[in-house]
Image (tube, rainbow, N blue to C red):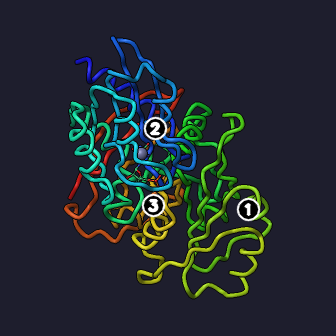
């Protein structure tokens, strides 16, 4: 029980790095000596230092003979920093409790072996499911080359996101909107389709949370036909803006966007649209581990149809628009119910006058 309690604390430490430490996993570490927490650490912005050296520095001499709780297997490789397993051995800790094994080929099992060879007691698998979920973006990137994808939908009771004339401000209430900003912070990037970028002129930045590191802003636009006078274009020098586009996008437009400060990521087509898998793989190649999609309907539909939505977060407001309104999800080309992506309900809660629910993808 105690192991689980301290690991839960390590998991909450790890979450502090989510959204800022990509391409590295957001790991958490807690050091406990004689029933007291003597060190806490998490992976730092940009991915280094790793969680363990931060916690060890805090613990100082108290690390000797202590128990270390770490959400991911300590690394064994000489990367840009020396191996964390070596640092733990040098600090003479007595026991290391690990939630999940690292899937990075340079580490995978070797970190645990180094610790055991040095005579340290090693326990694995404590709160493994929770850790695997928190670190899933890193595992997906390492194993499949794509990031974890959260899709957020803020809709009317009948699943619409705007009236026929395009009016959409505001369907959900201020509590929901603040929650969305908090979620943006937990992700490495926010992504929208070109239609939404044209219709809403969004900034895709995190406000209301003070001076925070902004997630990368990604817009998917096959032809790069986005307004040059938009907020996105005008802020591209200050906050990263990546445009995922088709190889057939106009070359002079490509140059214009580059000159504005955007980074261009070419992506293969799947029919007339950019391939959903291609979009996510382009982002995985750039090192992103967690991506937050905020629509619109076409991008949401293509990600869902490709079965690439790992987490679905819906906010529904007590308003009804009817069939003339824009649907949150565009056409998915499904013929049978059996082909539809399905989700498990994880939680639901009241958010002012709205209902927020969280759903996880069910593996096909
Ligand atoms: C840890 N603790 O907090 C993290 C780890 O490029 P480097 O040298 O920073 O190494 C990156 C790899 O280290 C990454 O792929 C993953 O295997 C591991 N991340 N390991 O012991 C940490 N973030
Ligand atoms: Zn490390």
Residue 273 lies, in percent from the top left, at 47, 78
Residue 24 placement, left or right of 346: right
194 relative to 353, above or below: below
- Tally the marks: 3
Residue 268 lies, in percent from the top left, at 46, 81
- For the N terminus, the image quarter is top left
* Residue 319 in view here: yes
Among the 4 quarters of the image, the one containing residue 302: bottom left
Distance from label 2 to label 1 (Cα)?
32 Å
Q: Is mark 2 within 8 Å of ligand 1?
A: yes
Residue linked to disc 3: 300
Of residue 32 and residue 362, the one placed in the foreground of this image is 32
Residue 122 lies, in percent from the top left, at 22, 33
Residue 233 placement, left or right of 37: right
Which structural element holds mark 2? helix
Residue 51 tag number: 2
Mark 2 near mark 1, Cβ–Cβ under 8 Å? no
Q: Closer to us: mark 1 or mark 3? A: 1
Residue 325 placement, left or right of 68: right
């Amino acid at each position: 029980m105690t192991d689980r309690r301290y690991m839960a604390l390590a998991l909450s430490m790890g979450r502090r790095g989510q959204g800022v430490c990509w391409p590295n996993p957001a790991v958490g570490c807690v050091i406990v000596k004689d029933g007291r927490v003597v060190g806490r650490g998490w992976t730092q912005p940009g991915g280094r230092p790793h969680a363990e050296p931060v916690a060890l520095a805090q613990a100082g001499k108290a690390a000797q003979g202590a128990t270390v709780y770490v959400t991911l297997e300590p690394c064994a490789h000489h990367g840009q920093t020396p191996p964390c397993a070596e640092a733990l051995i040098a600090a003479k800790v007595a026991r290391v409790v690990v939630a999940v094994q690292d899937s990075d080929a340079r580490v995978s099992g070797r970190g645990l072996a180094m610790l055991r060879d040095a005579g340290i007691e090693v326990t694995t698998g404590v709160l493994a499911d929770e850790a695997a979920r928190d670190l899933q973006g890193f595992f997906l990137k390492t194993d499949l080359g794509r990031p974890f994808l959260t899709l957020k939908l803020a809709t009317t009771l009948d699943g619409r996101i705007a009236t026929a004339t395009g009016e959409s401000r505001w369907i959900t209430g201020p509590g929901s909107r603040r929650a969305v900003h908090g979620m943006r912070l937990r992700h490495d990037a926010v992504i929208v389709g070109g239609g939404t970028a044209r219709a809403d002129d969004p900034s895709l930045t995190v406000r209301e949370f003070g001076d925070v590191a902004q997630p990368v802003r990604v817009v998917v636009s096959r032809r790069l036909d986005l307004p040059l006078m938009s907020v996105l274009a005008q802020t591209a020098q200050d906050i990263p803006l990546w445009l995922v586009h088709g190889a057939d996008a106009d070359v002079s437009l490509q140059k214009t966007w580059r000159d504005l400060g955007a980074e261009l990521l070419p992506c293969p087509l799947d029919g007339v649209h950019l391939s959903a898998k291609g979009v996510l793989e382009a982002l995985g190649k750039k090192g992103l581990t967690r991506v937050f999609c905020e629509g619109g309907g076409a991008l949401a539909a293509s990600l869902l149809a490709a079965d690439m939505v790992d987490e679905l977060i819906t906010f529904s407001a007590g308003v009804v628009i009817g069939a003339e309104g824009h649907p949150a999800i565009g056409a998915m080309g499904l013929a049978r119910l059996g082909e539809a992506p399905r989700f498990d309900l994880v939680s639901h809660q009241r958010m002012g006058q709205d209902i927020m629910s969280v759903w996880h993808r069910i593996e096909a």
